[in-house]
Image: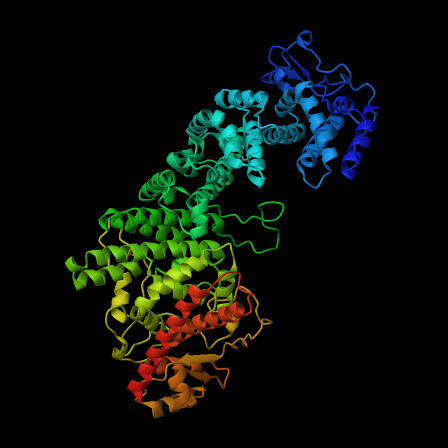
Amino acid sequence: MKSALLQQMYKDVVEGVLLARESNYYTSLLNLSVEQSPERDESGNGMHLPSPDGGIRSHRDTEMSDADVLTTDDVSNSFANVNPSFCPREVMLLQLTLIKMMVAKAESQEVEISMRQKYCEIFVLLLKEAKIDSQLICLVGSSDRLLSHMASKSLASLVYFQLKEENVLNVTWLTFSLKTLSGFPVDTQVAQCLWTLTAVLKEVLKDRALPKTGILMKLLAPLDAVLEEFYNSILVHHFDSHCYTSPYSEAANNLISFVDLLEALLTSRIELELPLRCQRVLFLKVSYVLNLISSSVHYLIKKLFIMLLKKCVLYKTREDARSGSLSLQNPSLYEDMLALSNAVLQVVNLAWFDRIPLNERISYFGGSEAPSGGDTQSGSDQTVLRALSLVVLKALEFKCQSSATEAEIKGDFQNSMSQLLIFWKSHLKSSPQSHTVVHQCEWLSLIFIEQDDDLWEAAKALLLIYLKFDRLRHDTADNSSQKEEETCDVLTHACGYNPHCIFLFSLEKIAFDSTVLLDFLISSETCFLEYLVRYLKLLRKDWHQFVEVCNYFDTKHASFRSIAPVGLPHQAKQSCMTGESLQNACEQEPQTPLSLASSRNCLVFTTEQRDNKVVESNLSNSLICSDSTSLLGSLQSLVNYDSSEESELEPDGKECLVNTKKVPLINESKKIVRETGCSYTDDAQNMHKSEVLPLEQKAPNTSSCLTCMASLDNIIPLRVMLHKSTKCLEELQKAISRLHRRNLFPYNPSALLKLLNHIGKISKNVNSQSEEVFQ
């Protein structure tokens, strides 16, 4: 009986036994015995499955009479001899499984050549004599979802097999695809057609030995025009209809399948020097997708398109992948990225974010409802939040890189960043460990800290924007005044893209752990190497700004975040970009239509001046003197490196670091420390070397220790942030050097080490000069 023979054939294929009988015998076993109408066999719409007592009948053909039916193979035109335990549907599923398995083995180089030749002979007979492709196309349109899916997989395998082995495109499948896609929206059943094309495309891209350029042209060129028309047809619908509000509807299924195809087309673009229109249409007509995202379509579909846009802005050609950055030398890619960037920035400036309510329900295994008795706290979808943010930031980056003057982008940049900062503020997930954001530049690290590859892509984008503005300002330096320069510096903080703040906030979120930075450098999934090299080059020539930002962190933000307000000494007011001028970065309203410093979207530093006296403040567990487990919530090491070679012991979280320079009231300071339960060690040598001094807590009275710290803050200028950041870079340099000496580093880090060494020398020279001053 046929089922037993198919089972034996399946066993032989799995075990790698050579099929000994004639190819015609195996062809008859694999013939699906699907009935077809001779007038419509090319399209496949006139094909029939066996009747209910002997198989399954297609829902498309119920109106046709049995007189119009012609069987494809007299040898196996019925399932009369099938084992009762095997129904016709199960026999057909076994046949489809065998076809897929045999195609995979025919393509494998690990299978003996004699067996591969046997499989090829069987496929030739199936395609030319049994018309298996037409039968599979019929099953693709079946109402039985499992049969339809298995038929799609087998059909895609055979189409790919012919492309690879015979260098020809299956005409029956091509005709079916053209007719189905061009018939939309009248013919709404396009999902399986899209899925089959996507599967063939992915198989081509996956094969490393295949000459992809010629194969892709042969596959996509005949479909190029109809795919662009289909793009226009499926994305111009009014998505407020109820059929798009459920992810299980046919309309939603069509959109989901189309997203998969667009992603495969985007990936395939790298293989063609001159991409086809179907590979560019997503860039050139991205406004259709942006409108869909802001519509009432189901959230799942929105999320898929948002993630697709993220892949578009991160797209790199082969040359770009080598250099690590997006090349503007490719004319088509430049044109496409410019069109996408302009469209994205245009809708963002029209309050597009307001029309995208992110899903506030947490996804759980097996469903979207929280288990009873569990933590039901929910927040915005952070994955989508990051993806949308990265799309806007990369669009801004490209727009800035392609602009010749500052005026071309300045207004759009400030407006877009204003909208983005509002968006971040409204969707950042709140938690008991969260703290008040007191600087716009901190938002980036808060939003992206859980996804390191996105974090450094976003940081790199803002760094490149800063460098572009800086270069344009220097080109017109003769015509710019000192006041204009200071205004530009203030705007970098108000717009949240000051590179030194972003770098320091990022280090703070990883607890200044150099081993985490080392992981980022070694990982091939992040662009941290490119970011770090660019930032170190900036740091080398902009060291004084870095030091001033560090000082400002010490006096108004970092370790003493929760001691606010505290009176600051007048000596802390430094020139250019410290103290008052940095506070103005958030308090001053930039001259833009959407002010960044408005009360609803800008959180500023606030400090009460009360004659340099300590003011009572709310105390929290986020201070350095408190338990290290609560250090700013997210300031935790991403990886446990306690067992790493030459690793240092983690601090116990009970040390308070302060600068010991300029101590005019040192005796009074000692007395204050002793009275409040903190000890003070006067070691001149350590003072000059490290510029920091530990204050060990002798009593569990946290309030006393904090009062001590606040008092010392009035008389001792802090250098904590500068010390921590430069020490982190120094440790990173030592770790890279150690690995490089042992040939354990994955690439040549010589250029990076040179930059790190130079930064280390600058830091030591500054410290030496400071020591000479105080000596």
Image quarter hosting the C terminus = bottom left
- Which of the pair 431/23 is nearer the observer? 23
Locate residue 575 relative to residue 157 in the image: left or right. left
Locate residue 719 relative to residue 13 in the image: left or right. left
- Which of the pair 321/487 is nearer the observer? 321
Total marks in image: 0
Image quarter hosting the N terminus = top right
Observer able to see residue 621: no
Q: Residue furthest top?
A: 67
Residue drawn at x 51%, y 28% is 218
With respect to residue 342, does 730 lie above or below?
A: below
- Which of the pair 86/121 is nearer the observer? 121
With respect to residue 463, does 614 lie above or below?
A: below
Residue drawn at x 66%, y 22% is 127
Image-quadrant location for residue 74: top right
Residue drawn at x 45%, y 71% is 728
Locate residue 482 relative to residue 688 in the image: left or right. left
Image-quadrant location for residue 692: bottom left
What colour scheme governs how the chains and residues are painted in the rendered image of this protein? rainbow
Residue 151's spot in the image, x, y percent?
A: 65, 28
With respect to residue 219, does 695 lie above or below?
A: below
- Which of the pair 404/346 is nearer the observer? 404
Image-quadrant location for residue 357: top left
Observer able to see residue 672: yes
Residue 137's spot in the image, x, y percent?
A: 62, 23
Residue 715's spot in the image, x, y percent?
A: 32, 83
Residue 637's spot in the image, x, y percent?
A: 52, 66
